[in-house]
Image: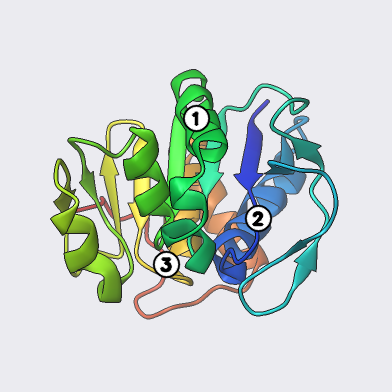
Amino acid sequence: MTAYGLLVFEDAEELDFVGPWEVFTVSARLRDSGDTAVLVCEHPGPVRCNKGLRVLPDHTFDDHPPLDVLHVPGGLGARESRLHNPVVTGWIARTAEQAAWVHGVCTGTFLLHAAGPARGRRVATHWSQEDTLEARGDVTVVRDARYVVDGGLVTSQGVSAGIDSALWLVGRLHGRDHARAVRRCIQYDPAPPYLADEPV
């Protein structure tokens, strides 16, 4: 059984977590093995995301189940307000220590850097923020890579790239044929299509 926990917060970029949510939940349905995906937030109640989508988290930092995969999206909230919130960065740090995998999308990498899991690692982020992240130090920003894997840390470029990295992750967890079945189910057919390529 695999438990996915997707962090949400005010001004999170919608597709940064909705794309991976689709991959993780379709994977769970295809596996029929009790896999779960939950949205986790600092506070209970609705959250308004970067472009106005409102979502209702399943859990707070205090009551979520143990997580095998911690997912951190980007957006304005990731690189501004939440970046300086020690409750959020502290929770990410603690949860990342317990999770088998940490998955960051877009400027979610800024939160992972502030919290610690991305420090000293090779990472990807949105092309427009690569210089800013690199200037923070203690991180190697890999440019022109859709996603990057460094140990148990998977980070991807912005927005739709999170679908690619999430597919790679379910392929790593449950096999390439399974990831291809997920890709087919969600009718995701980029150019080139997902072929379980090795990350940069």
Q: In the rendering, which numbered label is found on residue 90?
A: 1
Q: In the rendering, which numbered label is found on residue 161?
A: 3
Circle nearer the N terminus (3, 1): 1
* Quarter of the picture holding the N terminus: top right
Amino acid type indicated by mark 3: Ala
Classify residue 148 as left or right of residue 51.
Answer: left
Q: In the rendering, which numbered label is found on residue 21?
A: 2
Give the percent coordinates (x, y) of residue 156.
36, 58
Give the percent coordinates (x, y) of residue 107.
39, 61
User: From the viewer's perspective, is residue 175 above or below residue 13?
Assistant: above
At 67% from the left and 59% from the top, the residue drawn is 22
- Closest to the camera, between mark 1 and mark 2, is 1
User: From the viewer's perspective, is residue 146 above or below residue 155?
Assistant: below
At 15% from the left and 40% from the top, the residue drawn is 138
At 49% from the left and 30% from the top, the residue drawn is 90
In the image, 109 versus 5, the foreground residue is: 109
* Discs 3, 1 touching: Cβ within 8 Å: no
Residues at marks 3 and 2, CA–CA distance in whole angstroms: 13 Å
In the image, 89 versus 126, the foreground residue is: 89
Give the percent coordinates (x, y) of residue 111.
41, 47
User: From the viewer's perspective, is residue 162 above or below residue 5?
Assistant: below
Question: Quick one: label 1, few (<14), some, or many (20+) residues within 10 Å?
Answer: some
Residues at marks 1 and 2, CA–CA distance in whole angstroms: 23 Å
Residues at marks 3 and 1, CA–CA distance in whole angstroms: 26 Å
At 29% from the left and 39% from the top, the residue drawn is 118
